[in-house]
Image: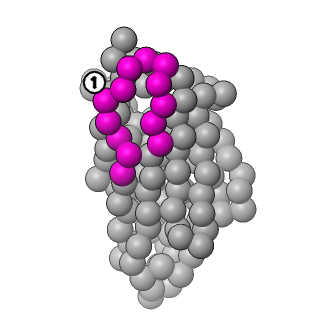
Amino acid sequence: QVQLVESGGGLVQAGESLRLSCAASGRIIRVNTMGWYRQAPGKQRELVAAVTSGGRMNYADSVKGRFTISRDNAKNTVYLQMNSLKPEDTAVYYCNADALSVPWVVSEYWGQGTQVTVSS
């Protein structure tokens, strides 16, 4: 079993920045892709950014040039640096990870979510 613990959400004004962190723990053998999704009220959950264990990244078009995803493989931690935040970035942000854990099981895991609110 793997647990994902997120931190770093909050309330900011438009144009400001936030950094989200998500640490994976448990009986981990290897963490593959890690990423961030978000869900705004009344909308479907959508991919924000993801990064593979090899460092390949992809971003939603709406955040390209403003958000940066990174990871520390030694700590099984993924980060999302969010700059130039806009009110439309307001959502609950969820960490997601694809991990291989004891006893040699590959599964997808989700964090509990962290609220990001951007005021205009």
Q: Nearer the viewer, residue 16 or 90?
A: 16
Q: Residue furthest bottom?
A: 103
Q: Residue at x 59, y 45 (%)?
A: 69
Q: Against 80, is 89 above or below?
A: above
Residue 110 position within the rendered picture, expressed as x and y whole percent measured from the top left: 37, 56
Q: Amino acid at mark 1?
A: Gly
- For the C terminus, the quadrant is top left
Query: Is residue 17 covered in magenta?
Result: yes
Residue 25 position within the rendered picture, expressed as x and y whole percent measured from the top left: 41, 73
Q: How many marks?
A: 1
Q: Residue at x 38, y 62 (%)?
A: 4
Q: Residue at x 36, y 51 (%)?
A: 7
What residue is disc 1 on? 42
Q: How is the image coloured?
A: one colour
Where, by quadrant of the figure, is residue 42 drawn?
top left
- For the N terminus, the quadrant is bottom left
> Which residues lie in the magenta part?
7-19
Q: Is residue 105 left or right of residue 94?
A: right
